[in-house]
Amino acid sequence: MRYRVMLPLLILTLMLGACAGPETLERRAGYTVDHSQVAPSHNSRVRHLVLHYTDGDEAEALATLTGPRVSSHYVLPRGPRGRVYQLVDESRRAWHAGASRWKGGSDLNATSIGIEIINAGPDHRAAEIERLLATDRAGAIAWAPYPEEQLSTLIALSRDIIDRHGIEATNVVAHSDIAPTRKIDPGPAFPWRRLHEAGIGPWPEPSAVARWRTRFAGESPSLTRLQEALAAWGYGLAITGEADPPTRAVLRAFQMRFRPADYRGLPDAETAAILWALLERYRPEAMPGR
């Protein structure tokens, strides 16, 4: 009886194998893979899109990013329009994020695609940048612009990646967002609002910012509440109630992105209003009290 049940199953299996055409068979060393059966139960490993600047020219960037220590999925040159280098397949980890945290997760190399944008960054060396930022002289730094043709290509590339992997708006992040104590790229000259208007990344509603600014005019949130809100937005920040170096670095990263006119890393009512407006729009369940 058992053999009469198994025989039809065996015949069906042989028939399915016979139906596999040569285009579904992949020969590898010592075995053959049959691609004729596809499971629908899967999704992309990619959850984040991380944007960087190279802080140098194209030749220098490509030499570094094709070396043994760091890499990126894509490198976006300044021209000609539409041209992009792909250095790592999207299915593979590129080494672009380093020690990183966002929304409670770490090791974003495992869950992200990285785009390096050819851009000279600030007009000072790294040691000078740290000194100028530490003394709140942000206005003393000049940042290289991002030309229109480069932005157009970046928008096309980013939208393609976001659409294919289903990346949430709040997971389109700057390198400085995920590593604020180490990185400042892509810097305050990067036009995040322009990308949002093209469907890439978050941006607060101006009316909501104005409403929260009015609410905070008399009394801004405490530093503890501000730290809680920054952590709720996604930053890996400990709640200390103190204006410690990590808090200043996170505030600087947030301000570079959403209030680039003043990115000294100081808490103020306008920064709080922008942050609460973003939480209200994108993460209302995570909003802290005052």
Image (cartoon, rainbow, N blue to C red):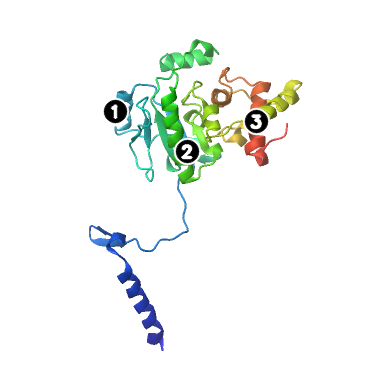
Pointer 2: what residue?
A: 159
Under circle 2, the secondary element is helix
Sequence-first tag of 1 and 2: 1
User: Viewer-proximal residue, 83 or 105?
Assistant: 83
Instruction: Write the residue at 42% across / 31% down.
Output: 153
For badge 1, the amino acid type reads: Ala
Rendered position, 51 above or below 138? below
Residue 286 is drawn in which quadrant?
Answer: top right
Q: Is residue 249 left or right of residue 86?
A: right
Mark carried by residue 253: none
User: Viewer-proximal residue, 70 or 36?
Assistant: 36
For badge 2, the amino acid type reads: Arg
Rendered position, 12 above or below 290? below
Pick the quarter of the image with the N terminus.
Answer: bottom left
Give the x, y percent position of residue 101: 51, 36
Instruction: Write the residue at 65% across / 30% down.
Output: 205
The residues tagged by marks 3 and 2 sit, at their Cα atoms, a distance apart of 21 Å
Query: How would you rate the neighbour count of disc 3 (Cα within 10 Å): few for under 14, some for 14-19, many for 20 or more?
Result: some
Sequence-first tag of 3 and 1: 1
Pointer 3: what residue?
A: 205
Query: How would you rate the neighbour count of disc 2 (Cα within 10 Å): few for under 14, some for 14-19, many for 20 or more?
Result: some
For badge 3, the amino acid type reads: Glu
> For the residues carrying marks 1 and 2, which lies nearer the camera in this image?
2
Pointer 1: what residue?
A: 63
